[in-house]
Image: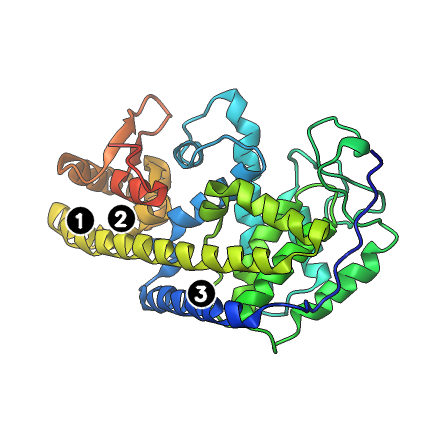
Amino acid sequence: MTRTPCIPPALPVSDLNWQRLLPMAGKANAALARYDGMLQALPNPAVLLSPITVNEAVLSSRIEGTQATLEEVLQQDAGIVQAQSRHADIEEIANYRAAMRDAEQALEHRPMSLSLIKGVHQRLMQGVRGHDKRPGEFRVDQNWIGHAGSAIENARFVPPSPLVLPQALDAWATYLSFEEDDPVIQVAVAHAQFEVLHPFKDGNGRIGRMLIPLLLFQRKTLSRPMFYLSEYLEANRDRYYDGLLSITETGQWQNWIEFFLEAMVVQADANLAKTRQILALYNDLKQRFIEATHSQFAIPALDAFFVRPVLNATDFACHTGIENRVTANGILKQVLSTGLILRLREAAGRTPAVFALPDLINIAEGRKVIG
């Protein structure tokens, strides 16, 4: 069977059942508002939510086929070299984190644009699988989605022709500036349309999922682009892909948007619960670190483990600002002796010891993986 490129759907979307969508959108916006209220109440969200920010990068990359776990990424960060088979995966996840940081910083000064997205894509693909597929440039040839090595005739989906892609991307970018639509519904449409257009030769899924919190941030639905939907999308991968496919196969936007709104409610509540757990853990450990160390560096020591839940002794001294290595090692010894952290690796010669904050890792993973 010959597969032909799909025709990009027109934006904005018409023929929606608003009677069904508006109550669902109301629930999604309320769930996001509850989560964002918690986000704004955090004393330092960049510190406290660092581990689940990393986990979002792990899960979004996993949807694209990587196998590395959060624990493996954190251990690699701390200098515990992982299996060779994981190195490429961990590089991709590191790029995802860096690209997301770049995008957040850029959005503080200018609105979302095609040039901004191209810059983020270039960072995402730097030195990893797909680095030879024109990073930072929209495609000028036909691509398709199917099993590895399959021909276009056997493709599951064939994105629009490169001849119509520039015009479709301009229409998509224009749609991002519309503020008449409900913000969550607009993000649902924008994410799906980006995946339909598949404008890059590789990395489209990850860029598309990054756009979700970034666009919610741009619409001021979130005070920070720290919203993590990939957990739900990874757990419901078939529904996710089938919903996207139905847009081009049957023009079915309604089902996709309903799926997205449901995902937002479930994930916002899950993110809120996880954030509450993290804040409660931080407040509990704050007092316990003070009691264990009786040091002015007790809170910087705790913050260091929240930023990097797996941390080697050298980086610990750097993150806490403790210039005296004896003092730094003394604090580590004190919190280790009280069972607040675990030692994953002993020091050997010039190789520093590595420690972990197991409770935080387990909250980020949503299950016990360490300790």
Most distant residue in the right direction: 163
Q: Amino acid at mark 2?
A: Ala
Residue at the spot of label 1: 289
294 displayed left or right of 87: left
Q: Which circle marks residue 28 in the picture?
A: 3
Q: Is residue 24 above or below residue 75?
A: below
In the rendered view of the protein, which quadrant contains the C terminus? Answer: top left
Most distant residue in the bottom direction: 180
Q: Amino acid at mark 1?
A: Phe
In the image, 40 versus 147, the foreground residue is: 147
Q: Contact, CB < 8 Å: mark 1 with mark 2?
A: yes
Please give the name of the residue rendered at 53% of the width and 22% of the height, measured from the top-left corner. Answer: 85
| Place of residue 63 in the rendered image (x, y in percent of width and height, measured from the top left) | 55, 39
Q: Quadrant of residue 226?
A: bottom left
In the rendered view of the protein, which quadrant contains the N terminus? Answer: top right
Please give the name of the residue rendered at 57% of the width and 33% of the height, measured from the top-left corner. Answer: 65
**Front tag of 2 and 3:** 3
Question: Mark 3 falls on what kind of element?
Answer: helix
Q: CA distance from mark 3 to mark 1?
A: 38 Å
